[in-house]
Image (cartoon, helix red, strand yellow):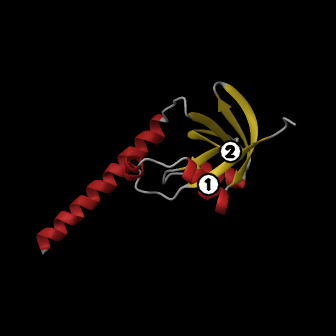
């Protein structure tokens, strides 16, 4: 019984280590691709972060898919953000997504199981980015 307990503890510690390393590398390198954008929040000073770009029913969304999500809490408190898409920067208002809209976007853009495993199965939150000053 003690051996099984030690093995289980070792597996859990190893898994937590994988999640910490994976999340840390993503945060440090902030890899850019065709499906990413740079969101800049302002809490007195600008803070930029590479996030995944999601589109659903003609709206632009970003998702908090990781345990470290300071940018997400920043946009909830300071919803006026700038977003760089394909080298062009525009102003947006970030709107927290709840209930039916959340379920729809989550179903439209599911995360692969391997990614969820590597990030430690964090809860997923969405923000809709509504354009400002373009009417």
Residue 98 seen in render? no
Report crowding for label 1: few under 14, some 14 to 19, many 20 or more residues within 10 A (C-alpha): few
Of mark 1 and mark 2, the one earlier in the sequence is 2
Image coordinates of residue 97 in percent, x first then y, are 67, 56
Image coordinates of residue 87 in percent, x first then y, are 65, 24
Q: Secondary structure at mark 1?
A: helix
Cβ atoms under marks 1 and 2 closer than 8 Å: yes
- Report the number of numbered marks: 2
**The N terminus, quarter of image:** bottom left
Q: Nearer the viewer, residue 45 or 19?
A: 19
Report crowding for label 2: few under 14, some 14 to 19, many 20 or more residues within 10 A (C-alpha): few
Q: Nearer the viewer, residue 68 or 108?
A: 108
Check disc 2 and report the residue beneath it.
57
Check disc 1 and report the residue beneath it.
104
Q: Residue at x 71, y 29 (%)?
A: 89
Image coordinates of residue 56 in percent, x first then y, are 64, 44
Left or right: where does residue 133 sit relative to residue 83? right
Q: Secondary structure at mark 2?
A: loop
């Amino acid at each position: 019984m003690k051996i099984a307990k030690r093995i289980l503890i070792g597996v859990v510690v190893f898994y937590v280590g994988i999640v910490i390393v994976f999340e840390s590398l993503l945060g440090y390198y902030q890899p850019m691709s065709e499906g990413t954008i740079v969101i800049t929040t302002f809490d007195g000073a600008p803070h930029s972060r590479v996030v995944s770009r999601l589109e659903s029913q003609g709206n632009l969304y970003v998702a908090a898919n990781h345990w470290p999500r300071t940018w997400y809490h920043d946009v909830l408190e300071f919803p006026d953000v700038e977003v760089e898409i394909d080298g062009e920067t525009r102003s947006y208002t970030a709107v927290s997504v709840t209930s039916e809209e959340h379920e729809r976007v989550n179903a439209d853009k599911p995360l692969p199981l391997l990614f969820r495993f590597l990030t430690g199965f964090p809860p997923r939150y969405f923000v809709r980015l509504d354009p400002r000053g373009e009417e």
